[in-house]
C-alpha cells in the first residue's frame, strides 16, 4: 500500500544570515490533519524555521514541499490561499474593526478592490461567532485584549480556509486560560497545524506529534510520550524534571506526559 505524502515536507533545509548558519539540515514532515508542535529553547531556531515555511525566509539550501510542490515554485497568491499564519505579536490594525480584520482572511481569495458579498459577510460573522467574539464585532481591533486579538486572528484564519495553519508562539502573552482556549480552538478547526510552543505541558496535551529543535538542528520527533522524556528535558532544555502521566488523561486510558519541574538544580 502506498503511504500518502505529507502535506508539508521539509528536506535538508539550511538557512542563515551573513555566513552564520542558523538552521542546519532540517528534515521535518507534517502529515495532513495532524496538530504538530515545535519546541526548543530560546534562540533554537523555531521562528526561523516557521518563517521559512511561510516564505518569509528563503532557505540557502534544501526544499520545502507543500502537497508535493516546491513552495518557491508556487505563485505567492496560490500559496497564501493555502497557508494561514498566526504570530506571537498581533499586528497593528489601526482604525480597523474586529470584523474588518477577520475579513482580511478573504484577501488571498479576492481580486483587488472587489467588495465583500453577502455570503462572505455571513462567513465572517460565523467565524467571529466560532471564536466567541460576536459581542465585539464592531469594536476597534486595537482595543481588544491580547487573548481576544489572538482569537480574532484565528477567526481570520477560519475565513481564509487554509489547508495549513502555522502558529508561532501565539499564546505567549496570554494568561493560562486564554493559552488553553486559543490552542484548543486552533485544534478544533481540524486543519493541519504546525505551532511553536513554550509551554511543554500544553504541547503535550494538544499535539499529535512533537518536533524538537536545538541549536538549529532537529534532535527529536515523535509522539509527546516518545519525545517528552526526563532525559530530553535535561539534554535539550537543561532542566531537572519528572515526567508522569496527566491524571485527567489516565482516567480516559490515554497517555499524555505531564512535566513537574524541580527547582534549585543546575
Ligand atoms: N534576521 C536575522 N538576523 C540575524 N540573526 C537572526 C535573524 N533571525 C534569527 N536570528 C538568530 O537566529 C537564532 C534563532 O532565532 P529564532 O528567533 O529562530 O529562535 P527561537 O527558537 O524562535 O527563539 P525564542 O524561543 O527565543 O523565540 C537566534 O540566535 C537569533 O538571534
Image (cartoon, rainbow, N blue to C red):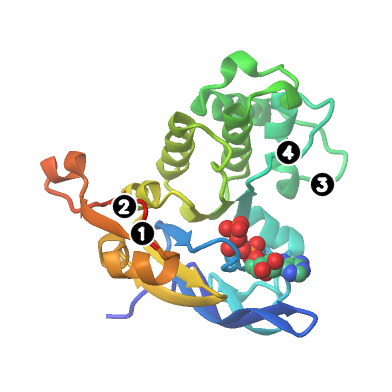
Rounded to the nearest angstrom, the CA distance separating label 1 from label 4 is 48 Å
Quadrant placement of the C terminus: bottom left
Identify the residue at horizontal 44%, vertical 58% (top origin).
Answer: 37
Instruction: Using a 10 Å C-alpha cutoff, classify the residue at mark 4 as few (fewer than 14 neighbours), some (14 to 19) or many (20 or more).
Output: some
Choose between 156 and 226: the one closer to the eye. 226
Residue annotated with mark 3: 111
Q: CA distance from mark 2 to mark 3?
A: 55 Å
Which mark is in front, 4 or 3? 4
Label 3, residues with CA under 10 Å away: few <14, some 14-19, many ≥20: few
Which quadrant of the structure image shows residue 30?
bottom left
- Observer able to see residue 52: no
In the image, taking residue 5 as reference, residue 81 lies left or right, namely right
User: How many numbered circles are shown?
Assistant: 4
Q: Which residue is mark 1?
A: 265
CB atoms at circles 2 and 1 under 8 Å apart?
A: yes
Closer to the observer: label 4 or label 2? 2
Residue 104 badge: 4
Which residue in the structure is indicated by mark 2?
262
Amino acid at each position: 500500500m502506498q503511504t500518502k505524502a505529507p502535506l508539508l515536507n521539509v528536506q535538508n533545509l539550511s538557512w542563515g544570515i551573513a555566513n552564520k548558519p542558523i538552521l542546519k539540515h532540517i528534515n521535518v514532515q507534517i502529515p495532513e490533519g495532524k496538530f504538530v508542535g515545535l519546541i526548543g529553547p530560546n534562540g533554537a531556531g523555531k521562528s526561523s524555521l516557521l518563517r521559512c515555511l511561510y516564505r518569509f525566509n528563503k532557505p540557502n539550501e534544501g526544499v520545502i514541499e507543500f502537497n508535493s510542490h516546491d513552495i518557491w515554485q508556487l505563485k505567492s497568491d496560490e500559496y497564501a490561499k493555502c497557508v494561514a499564519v498566526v504570530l506571537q505579536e498581533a499586528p497593528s490594525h489601526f482604525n480597523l474593526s474586529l470584523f474588518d480584520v477577520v475579513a482580511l482572511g478573504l484577501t488571498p481569495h479576492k481580486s483587488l478592490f472587489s467588495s465583500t458579498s453577502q455570503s462572505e459577510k455571513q462567513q465572517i460573522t460565523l467565524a467571529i461567532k466560532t471564536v466567541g467574539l460576536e459581542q465585539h464585532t464592531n469594536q476597534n481591533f486595537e482595543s481588544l485584549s491580547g487573548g481576544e486579538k489572538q482569537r480574532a486572528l484565528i477567526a481570520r484564519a477560519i475565513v481564509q480556509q487554509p489547508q495549513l495553519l502555522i502558529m508561532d508562539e501565539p499564546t505567549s502573552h496570554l494568561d493560562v486560560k486564554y493559552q488553553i482556549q486559543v490552542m484548543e480552538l486552533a485544534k478544533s478547526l481540524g486543519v493541519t497545524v504546525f505551532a511553536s510552543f513554550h509551554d511543554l505541558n500544553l504541547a503535550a496535551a494538544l499535539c499529535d506529534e512533537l518536533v524538537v529543535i536545538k541549536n538549529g538542528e532537529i534532535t527529536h520527533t515523535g509522539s509527546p510520550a516518545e519525545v517528552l522524556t526526563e532525559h530530553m528535558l535535561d539534554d535539550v532544555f537543561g532542566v531537572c524534571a519528572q515526567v508522569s502521566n496527566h491524571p485527567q488523561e489516565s482516567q480516559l486510558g490515554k497517555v499524555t506526559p505531564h512535566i513537574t519541574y524541580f527547582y534549585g538544580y543546575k
